[in-house]
Image (tube, rainbow, N blue to C red):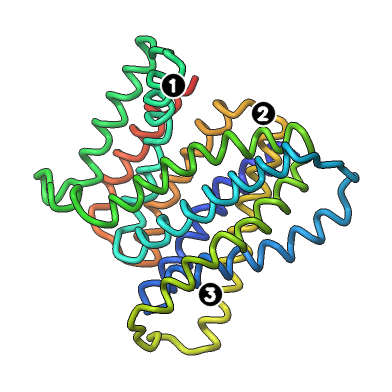
Amino acid sequence: MLYFALLLRILANPLANVFQKKLTSSGVQASEVNMYAYVFAFFVSLVCLHFSPEVHAGPGVLLLCLFSGFLGATGNFFLIKALESGELSVLGPINSYKPVYGIIFGILLLGEYPDFYALLGVAAIIFGSYFMFDSKGAFNADKLFNRAIAYRIAALALASLEAVFLKKIIIQTSAEFGFCAWAMTGVIFSLPFVALGGRQKKCAPKISKSKQFLFFGLTGAFVSAMQLSTNWVFAYMQVGLALALFQLSGVISVILGLLFFGEKNFWPKLAGSLIMCMGAAAVIL
């Protein structure tokens, strides 16, 4: 069960990103993509909760759910905004920077300082990043300093904090309850983004209604699979080891970027994503 959940998580995350990017690049609002994915996940969660053991959530757990929901909905919105204009093969591997946030938070909040291997891992992540922003043999700073990267970094910071609250919820309840709480609060906290997006001037989407419906369904299905499998993995594995293995999604993102969007510099990006993945593992483990 654990290995199946781990494999599902590694594959579902970049596949969800593919259809999120297809929707936003065709003119669909990022806020709508975010909300409908949570709505789809909520109906999936009701089925899962029906077959899971009954749990009793106290006020403390409910408060954790609210914090987690806010962080998740906001982080996912920023991620989708990043995919709107950024390359999947670049934004996916950047997830390897998540352990770096852990080090920074540890120093500032807990007084914990990284050891030699963690610093070596950070160096590997930075070195691997060079290949992500390489253009015809030269480092391209324009690819590094842009809005998509800023959105992705913001999403990473929020996701790092969300994982802590989510783990606490799962420990006190169950993986299925955590998924239901994540989906329900995600719907609630994604609504303000839809309201704000509604004030912006909209352009008609460049794809048909039937294709929009298909892509929304696929996005919701892969997002649901990604989050539910994440909860299952957290329930049976230490967060650090799980996060290290999750970085393999970055490698899949590079492959899918080529297959679905024809993104360039495949081999340098593949090498860079592998280096970043190993660096993340060194930091976490």
Q: Residue type at mark 3?
A: Phe
Which residue corresponds to mark 2?
237
Choose mark 2 or mark 1, whichever is in front: 1
Residue most extreme to the front? 59
Task: Give the residue drawn at x 65%, y 40%.
Answer: 64
Q: Secondary structure at mark 2?
A: loop
Three-letter amino acid code at the position of disc 2: Met
Which callout, 2 or 3, points at the residue further toward the start of the chain?
Answer: 3
Vertical arrangement, residue 195 with respect to residue 141, above or below: below
Contact check, label 1 and label 3, Cβ < 8 Å? no
Real-space CA distance between mark 2 and mark 3, rounded to the nearest whole angstrom: 32 Å
Q: Which residue, given by chain and number where applicable, does mark 1 sit on?
A: 109
| Disc 3 secondary structure class | helix
Mark closer to the chain start, 1 or 3? 1
**What x and y, as percent, mark residue 178?**
71, 45
Relative to residue 264, is residue 67 depicted above or below?
above
Left or right? Give the position of 191 relative to 29: right
- Residue type beneath disc 1: Leu
